[in-house]
Image: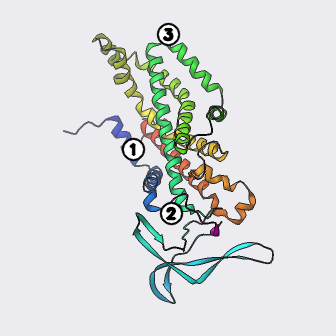
Amino acid sequence: MQKHKSQFSIAIASFAKHRLAMICFYVLAALYASALLADFLSPYPPANEDRNYSYCPATAIEFFDQGRLSWPFVYGRALSFDINHKRSYVVDKTQKYSLSFLNNRHLFSVKEPGRIYIWGADSRGRDMFSRILHGARISLSIGLIGSLISFSLGLIVGGVAGYFGGWVDGVLMRVCEMFMLVPAFYLMLALRSVVPDNVNAFQIYLMVILILAFIGWASLARIIRGMSLSLRQRDFVLAAKAMGVSDIKIIFKHILPHTLSYSLVAIMLTIPSYILLEAGLSLFGLGIQDPTPSWGNMLSEAMGIVQIQFAPWIMMPGLFIFVTVLCFNVVGDALRDAFDPLYRE
């Protein structure tokens, strides 16, 4: 006899058939895995700098020495100026620095005083590759954790308002409307302005998460409230009431679980907006502070056209933000279609 499949498993199977969404899912998985393994994958700590290599372009890894296969190495770089005092780096083939692998808990590194820059260096001679990997920890985790906190609060408030109705519903929805009246970015700036500046990096990280969670719960609460209003009249809820099950258990065991499919889709579509809000906050110097990297504060170096023309690789964090937001939106749209029987294949 064929085993009956749940609606959730059917939706996941439908999502797995969406090729573009699966590609984006694997890209997101690779980004999160790279963030978790940032210490191992990056050749330098994020704050490691060498001012002699300010805005140094990407370093080529050499595998041949005088036409013969050799252990991987990099050439040195020498700073030079032309007659117009324009600075540039030239390859110094008299200096060779061998690469070492699985040394000092790093996948690869280069012997000092050599430097290796996979994606170039910033204004302080810090490795962009290392800082992007470590910055992914901040940007990706803030979006994920902030959305989970926000949606947990929205689920509870919406579930309580929809189930009880009456004055409880009226009070909670008026509170939600007060938060929704103010544009999210301005509300975020207002909340950030009341936080003192003399806090460490970890406190700022927690503060940004709480601010993002605080501004995003109201819209979800209103939607969950509408779903709860319809669910509370269903037979399984009425049966639970007749059996004497408490209101709290009915809300958490019978009503909110039926909203999880929508919540999963909504979380996937909300995470990119939180990533963009954090990037904007850090870009204006109100979020994660340098030298702790995030994709937002790394883009602060790309505020001038001169820097972009001289070192276009400093725009690399913007490319990662774009790819991450795009992948989350594609995955979220595919999940929405998968959970909707009208669009399901």
Q: Which residue is drawn at 36% across and 15% down?
A: 247
Q: Residues within 10 Å of mark 3 (few under 14, many from 20)?
A: few
Residue, disc 3: 166
Of the residues shown, which amino acid type is indicated by label 2? Answer: Tyr
Q: Residue furthest front?
A: 198
Are the two marked residues, 1 and 2, in contact with CB atoms closer than 8 angstroms? no
Q: Which of 283 and 193 is in front in this view?
A: 193
Q: Which residue is drawn at 56% across and 34% down?
A: 211
Q: In this orientation, which residue lies closer to the viewer: 130 or 289?
A: 289
Residue at image coords 51%, 59%: 45
> Considering the image in quadrants, where does the C terminus appear?
top left
| Tag 2 residue | 44
Outermost residue toward the left in this view: 1
Q: Name the residue under label 1.
A: 14
Q: Which marked residue is nearer to the observer: mark 3 or mark 1? A: 3
Gap between marks 2 and 3 measured at Cα: 59 Å
Mark before the other along the chain sequence, 2 or 3 = 2
Residue 109 included in the magenta stretch of the image? no
Residue 330 appears in the figure: no
Residue found at the very far right of the displayed protein: 84
Q: In this view, does 81 lie to the left or right of 69?
A: right
Residue type beneath disc 3:
Gly
Find residue 191 and report its horizontal and vertical position in percent: 62, 32
Q: Give the range drawn in magenta.
A: 42-56
Q: Does the magenta-highlighted stretch encompass residue 51?
A: yes
Label annotation for residue 284: none
Give residue 336's position: percent from left, percent from top: 47, 38
Query: Which quarter of the rendered picture does the N terminus lie within?
Result: top left
